[in-house]
């Protein structure tokens, strides 16, 4: 596909799921006014209709961007995930179409870590069930099964940005921190990496999950893993709903194997605040259930809005892909005075040679060229004289292995 440069007023941004107004403000400051805003995720057919004319789409965790949706999005250049997780996007399908996907890798990290600490304190004190009882008129003043977090063992599964931040806060409150990760990580403070998930589960008083949604994390906490946890321990999941087998967790709570749980993410989540939340966990007073709000603070949402909108605007303005999750990363200078060709291709032998032949055979002077590749895709950016950009765009689109070409001026 070859795309001509468009005036900013013709470039359409479709922003869904109530992304923070800071995103709109940032886009406007960059000169983009054609912004369609929706407060909710759209049902599939409405999404397809709205995305058909969009060049950029902004989503949070609810909108599923499948291959089928991308098929309806013929003008789409990039996706902005106004969150950390990108599992809601079919990244393979996006890459095959040369659609860049951006996210905000740490703007809500602190918000998640703070929520988890709060939940660990509340659950160790039995506040969830005492609160529920008080709402029913019952007075449960007792110190039985009510503990400080000081001195307790926190087991963190997934020691990435959130896991590490959580570990630091937990230690400052006197907890002992253990973590399990598939990658060897530098432990912060006195945290200690353990070699297996089973070892972590069998030692921790509180287990908190901070892994991404992948094939390897699917139901990573099921009946077998819950059985390893010490009697009276606590499970917290603010990662993704697919990581915990919810029925197995319900059984462990019913059998009083665990003394409580805090769950922010669910295998199936309501599409909007108008839909009923259905879960087998609703019956348990000792379980804190939150509507996927780990990253939902004013601070996080404002920062995410600015960060992701800025990435989309920069990609639109000059082709910079810094921190794209599915494209080679190229940080580009401005290109005043020249036209800029962007070429996304399959990373196979011969493509660069064919691209360079386009310029040598047509006697087109190249003023700058930038190239980055990953294992699947190559991204080459070429600045040339304005007079030649039409012919170069046409020839580049015909190079074998081309996924997409675009010209910016
Ligand atoms: N509840 C909410 O609102 C939010 C949820 N999240 C979720 O939290 C997840 C984690 O976020 P970050 O810490 O920023 O991600 P990150 O990418 O910095 O860290 C993830 C860690 O998990 C590890 N990991 C991956 N697969 C694993 C496995 N099978 N076993 C053990 N460790 C494994 C990785 O090596 C990495 O260290 C996100 O992917 C997202 O799904 C993020 C923000 C808000
Ligand atoms: O706030 C949201 O919409 C989603 C937060 C989240 O799960 C993430 O950042 O991965």
Image: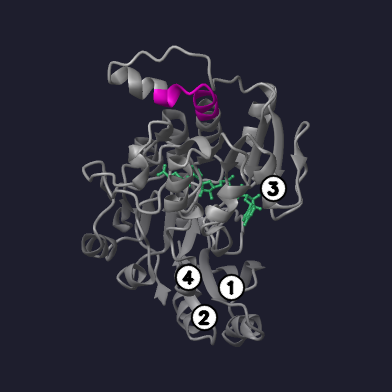
Q: Quick one: label 1 or label 2, which is nearer the N terminus? A: 1
Queried on whether the Cβ of the residue with tag 3 lies below 8 angstroms from ligand 1, the answer reads yes
Q: Residues within 10 Å of mark 2 (few under 14, many from 20)?
A: many
- Tell me what residue is drawn at x 75 percent, y 46 percent: 194
Q: Position of residue 125 (x, y in %)?
A: 52, 21
Q: CA distance from mark 1 to mark 2?
A: 10 Å
The residue segment tinted magenta is 119-129
Residue 125 among magenta residues: yes
Q: Quick one: label 1 or label 3, which is nearer the N terminus? A: 3
Q: Which residue is mark 3?
A: 180
Q: Which residue is mark 2?
A: 402
Question: Which is more toward the observer, 75 or 244?
Answer: 244
- Tell me what residue is drawn at x 26 percent, y 65 percent: 48
Q: Position of residue 22 (x, y in %)?
A: 39, 36
Q: Which residue is mark 1?
A: 377
Q: Answer yes or no: do the residues labelled 1 and 3 have beta carbons within 8 Å?
A: no
369 left or right of 272 in image: right
Question: Which is more toward the observer, 108 or 232?
Answer: 232
Q: Position of residue 45 (x, y in %)?
A: 22, 64
- Tell me what residue is drawn at x 61 percent, y 43 percent: 229
Q: Quadrant of residue 71?
A: bottom left
Which circle, 1 or 2, is nearer the viewer?
1
Q: CA distance from mark 1 to mark 3?
A: 32 Å
């Amino acid at each position: 596909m070859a795309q001509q440069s468009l005036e900013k007023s013709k470039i359409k941004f479709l922003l869904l799921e109530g992304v923070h107004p800071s995103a709109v403000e940032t886009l406007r400051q960059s000169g983009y006014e054609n912004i369609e805003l929706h407060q909710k995720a759209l049902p599939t057919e409405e999404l397809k209709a709205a995305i058909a004319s969009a060049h950029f789409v902004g989503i949070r965790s609810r909108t599923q961007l499948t291959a089928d949706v991308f098929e309806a999005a013929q003008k789409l250049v990039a996706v902005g995930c106004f969150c950390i997780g990108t599992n809601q996007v079919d990244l393979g399908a996006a890459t095959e179409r040369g659609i860049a996907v951006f996210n905000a890798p740490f703007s809500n990290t602190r918000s998640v870590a703070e929520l988890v600490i709060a939940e660990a304190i509340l659950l160790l004190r039995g506040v969830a069930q005492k609160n529920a009882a008080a709402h029913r008129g019952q007075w449960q003043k007792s110190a039985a099964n009510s503990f400080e977090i000081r001195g307790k063992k926190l087991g963190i599964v997934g020691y990435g940005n959130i896991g590490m931040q959580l570990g630091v806060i937990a230690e400052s409150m006197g907890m002992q921190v253990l973590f399990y990760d598939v990658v060897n990580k530098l432990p912060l403070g006195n945290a200690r990496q353990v070699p297996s998930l089973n070892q972590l589960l069998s030692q921790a008083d509180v287990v908190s999950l901070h892994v991404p949604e992948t094939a390897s994390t699917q139901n990573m906490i099921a009946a077998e893993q819950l059985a390893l946890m010490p009697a009276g321990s606590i499970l917290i999941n603010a990662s993704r709903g697919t990581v915990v087998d919810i029925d197995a967790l319900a059984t462990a709570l019913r059998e009083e194997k665990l003394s409580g749980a805090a769950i922010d993410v669910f295998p199936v989540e309501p599409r909007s605040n108008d839909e009923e939340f259905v879960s087998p966990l609703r019956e348990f007073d000792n379980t804190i259930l939150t509507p996927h709000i780990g990253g939902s603070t004013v601070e996080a949402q404002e920062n995410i809005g600015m960060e992701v909108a800025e990435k989309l605007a920069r990609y639109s303005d000059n082709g910079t892909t810094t921190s794209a999750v599915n494209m080679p990363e190229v940080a580009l200078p401005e290109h005043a005075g020249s036209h800029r060709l962007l070429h996304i291709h399959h990373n196979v032998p011969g493509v660069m040679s064919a691209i360079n032949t386009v310029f040598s055979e047509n006697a087109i002077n190249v003023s700058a060229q930038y190239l980055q590749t990953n294992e699947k895709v190559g991204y080459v950016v070429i600045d040339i004289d304005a007079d030649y950009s039409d012919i170069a765009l046409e020839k580049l689109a015909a190079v074998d292995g081309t996924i997409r070409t675009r010209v910016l001026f």
